[in-house]
Each structure stands twice: as structure tokens, then as C-alpha cells.
Amino acid sequence: MSGRLIGGRYELATILGQGGMGQVWTAYDQRLDRRVAVKLLHPDRVMGSIGSQAAAELRRRFVRECRVTAQVDHPGLVTVHDAGSDGDDLFLVMSHVEGSDLADHLAEHTPYPWQWSVAVAAQLCAVLCAVHAVPIVHRDLKPRNVMVRPEGTVLVLDLGVASVLDTDTTRLTHTGSPIGSPAYMAPEQAMGGAVGPYTDLYALGVLLHELLSGDVPFAGSTALGVLHRHLYEAPVPVRQLRPNVPEALEALVLRLLAKDPQHRPASAQEVYESLAPLLPTRSTGLPSQPLDPTRPFLRPHAPWPDRVTTPPAAQPAPMPARPDVAAAVDEVKKLLGEGRITQAVDLLGGILPAAAEQHGEGSPVVRILRKQYAATLMDDGQYRRALPELRRLADDHAAQAGPADPQTLQFRRDAAHCLEQLGETAAALAEYRAVLPYYENRYATGNDPARSYEIRHRIGHLLLALGDHAAARGQLQSLLYDTERMYGPHHPLPAELRRQLERQLKVRGG
């Protein structure tokens, strides 16, 4: 199924997850050359065989629901780009979100700090307030439909999708399971009654109980058994399972899990106000780390934390165990020819480990692939990812051909360009200065006056950026003299240099 084109535009790449209603894929928007996430829904698998008239109505409702939910403007909702049908499937195109879904986040951080639980629930309340004001009911709030981004903000997925397939929540699928997620289903939803904001608040209570205790309040071997427990059993208070949870938080969870909707909080706003006194402050907060949901409260609107490693959204798509490297290279050429750079980057990153295993790290095939990978990353503006690749290429090539080899110098010059684009001005200046003598030495194999002029020009700009105006002026004045001798006074380069020097004089003169 990988490679399937959805809606004539979105090429499926790697499956991210699947459930009873469908699958979620990473995909590439061929028109805008960007990564997206595509959710494929299979109505027939959920509802069994349906007639053509019912199928057409389902598609109309799906597109209408997606259109309505896409108009809800809140930073805690994933952006919806497109929706429609493709063959027998319905599809929803969303932003590709970096981070971890809440279920995985909980599994990786057990026991989950109760302060994190409060921060997640408070952010979800803000989303639910915006959603319920429309009014829309999510109907399927659960950890798998919540993402925690690297800077700690929480995003809600699948808004409105459940309502399309869930007009009768008591109806079973052809696999014998109820539509929706029984572990998070409110009693009124389980009975097929009217749903409302209070239904989402119950699911929020289940989710909060799970974060605090490590498990949902009602589990069982069958879906119907779980629904029966929702209807008739009382939840175990979380402090019996985890005594360090504040009493006020335990009381709020029990109110959210009330069987009667009228006994639950009146709104998500009320829940937020109950959580607010428990939110961390700078004096009480835990040490900040990536994917820390307290961070938006401790450092609101702060820049994202540094990501030393490749972020999840930028990691290469996994490849088969023994991919056809030659065929992948041909595909990369095709993608680059079509201007689909982002997709080519991921394909190259995916085949490099396999190519190194098959041919050896130092083989010509791997060197060519690494060179293409670095160049494509630069073309895609991904300078932070390109930089270590270029440095590795430069070191490997220098070891074989020497530091003055033109290809070695090209890699180092490209690395300097990456540093410049990343704002690492001093490091870029040092790198340009290190390679410049090789281009100016007429006896060196890399001698290239035109390239040396280009590097000297960049050095002048970097000196200006560092505030060393006198050195920058001397650099540009010397360059002007040399380029006029080489090209004549009317060549574009000396003409541009004269304009720059005149501008500096005007600025200094006020």
C-alpha cells in the first residue's frame, strides 16, 4: 500500500498506526512537497456492507463534518488540510506532528508525574472549551488521540471523525466491537443516549485517572464487559493507588467520572479552574526536559528546546530489510526531477544504512549517496541536518585525497555556508578563512581565483555581522581592487562592492 496516491496528490509512505476504523500514514503532498499525515477510514470494515445510497450519505457527512471541524481555530488542535474519499476509503489530511502520542508518552514515563497529568488535563480543557463552543463533541478522547509535542504543548487529533461513524454508539461493528473506545466511553454514550460536552468530560476523567494511576478505571476482557463496568461500578479513588496525588485532584477525577452527567463539572472551563491551583510554578515545577507538558506553563511562549538529535518528523522513513539500492537511487533522481525534494531527502536517509551494510561504508556507492543526501538536505533548507553529513564527507575525502583536493574544499565550503545560514557567524568565518588559502595558492590543486573572491566576499559580510566594521571595510576594499584588475570596473562584482562600500560610508556618516 506504500506508494498509493490518495486524492491524486498525497503519496502514502510509512504506516504510523492502525485501529478498527482505519490507518494513519505519513505521506507526501506532491503539490506542495511537504510531509503530511493521512488518516484512512474504512467504513465497510467498521459497519459491514452498506448500500450505495448509505455510502454516499456517509461520504457527504464525513466531508461536511471535516469542513466544520477545520474551522475551529485553536493551537491545541491539529491542522486539517484536506478531506474526501478515495475509492472505498475516506481520507483526512492533517499536519505531520512531531512528538509522541500520549499513550506512548505515559508508557515511557511511568509513574507519570502528577504535575504532568495536571498540565496535560489543563491543556485539554482549553481545547475542549473551544470545541464545545462551536458546539462539537469529540466523542473519542483518549491517549492515542492526543499528541505531546517536543516543547510540551498538547494537540488533539481526530476531532469530528467519531461523530461521522458513531450515530448509534451501541451498534457493533462486523468484528463484534462497539464503535469508539470502550475504555473511555461515558455511560450515556455506551447506552446509545444523547452525547454532549459532558461526554467528553467523562473521557477526560478516564484519561486523567489513567495518567495518575497507570491504568484506566474500568478494564475487562470484552468490550461489552468494560461498558457494563462503566455503567454499574464505582472507580477506585486514585489516592488508594498512588497516595502522593493531591486530594483536590482525586476529588476532581471522581466528579468527572460520575455516572450521571448532571453530577459532573458543568464545563471544561470549570474543570480548568479546578486544575489551575495545581498547575506548577517556577518554584514547584520539575526540571524541564523534552516533551514536558508542564513547560508551556513554566515557560510560556518560550522557544522550543534545542534538539540535538533528529526530530521524529524528520527521521528517514524505514526501509525494507534488503532494499534495492539501485532502484531507490533511480527513484531519488525521479523525485528530484519532479521537484519533490522533501520526499527525496527521506528516501535517501532511509537507504543509506542499507547501502552501507550491502556495499561497505567506504564504498563509492555510499559516498555518492552521502554526497547526494547532503546536497539534497541543503536544497531543502535543512542546514542543521546537512552540516554533520558535510563534515563527515570532508573528513573522509581529505583522508583519501588530501586537504587541498577540490572536492574536500567543496564540502568544507558547503559546511561553512550551513554554519552561516544557522547564524553561527564566528564558526562560519573560521571555516571560510581556513579554506581560503587553498583557493589563493596558485600552486595548489584547488586554486580558483573566482572562488577565492566569492569566499572573501562572504568573509566581509560575516565581519560586518560580527560588528568588526573596520576589518570588513578593509576586506571589501582589497577585494574591490583585485576584482577590478581581474574583471574590469564594470563587471557586476566590483560594481556591487563599490555600492556596499558607499553604503557603509553613508551609514557611518549618518
Image: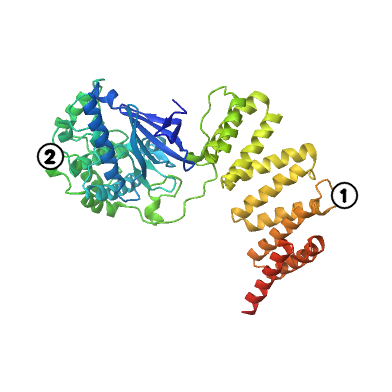
The residue sitting at 27% across, 48% down in the picture is: 125
Q: Is residue 281 above or below residue 331?
A: below
Which quadrant of the structure image shows residue 332? Answer: top right
Relative to 196, 504 lies left or right:
right
Screen quadrant of the N terminus: top left
Image disc number at residue 338: none
Looking at the image, is 270 positioned above or below residue 180? Answer: below
- Disc number lying in front (2 or 1): 1
Query: Toward which corner of the image does residue 240 lie, by quadrant?
Result: top left
Given the current orientation, which residue lies at the most extreme bottom position? 509
- Work out whether residue 237 can be spotted: yes
Q: On the image, numbered disc 1 is attached to which residue? A: 443
- What's the amino acid at mark 1? Tyr
Badge 1: few (under 14), some or many (20 or more) residues near its Cα, within 10 Å? few
Q: Residue furthest right?
A: 443
Position of residue 446 measured from the top left corner of the image (x, y, whole percent): 80, 47
The residue wearing badge 2 is: 260
N-terminal label among 2 and 1? 2
Query: Depth check: 294 or 245 in front?
Result: 294
| Quadrant in the picture for the C terminus | bottom right
* Image vertical order of residue 66 relative to residue 52, above or below: below
Viewer can see residue 239 = no
Q: Choose between 25 and 471: the one closer to the eye.
A: 25
Q: CA distance from mark 2 to mark 1?
A: 88 Å
Dot 2 and dot 1 residues touching (CB under 8 Å): no
Q: Is residue 198 above or below residue 175?
A: below
Q: Residue 149, image x and y in percent? A: 41, 44
Count of all numbered marks drawn on residues in the image: 2
Question: Residue 366's x, y, as percent?
Answer: 67, 31
Q: Amino acid at mark 2?
A: Asp
Q: Residue at x 21, y 47 (%)?
A: 135
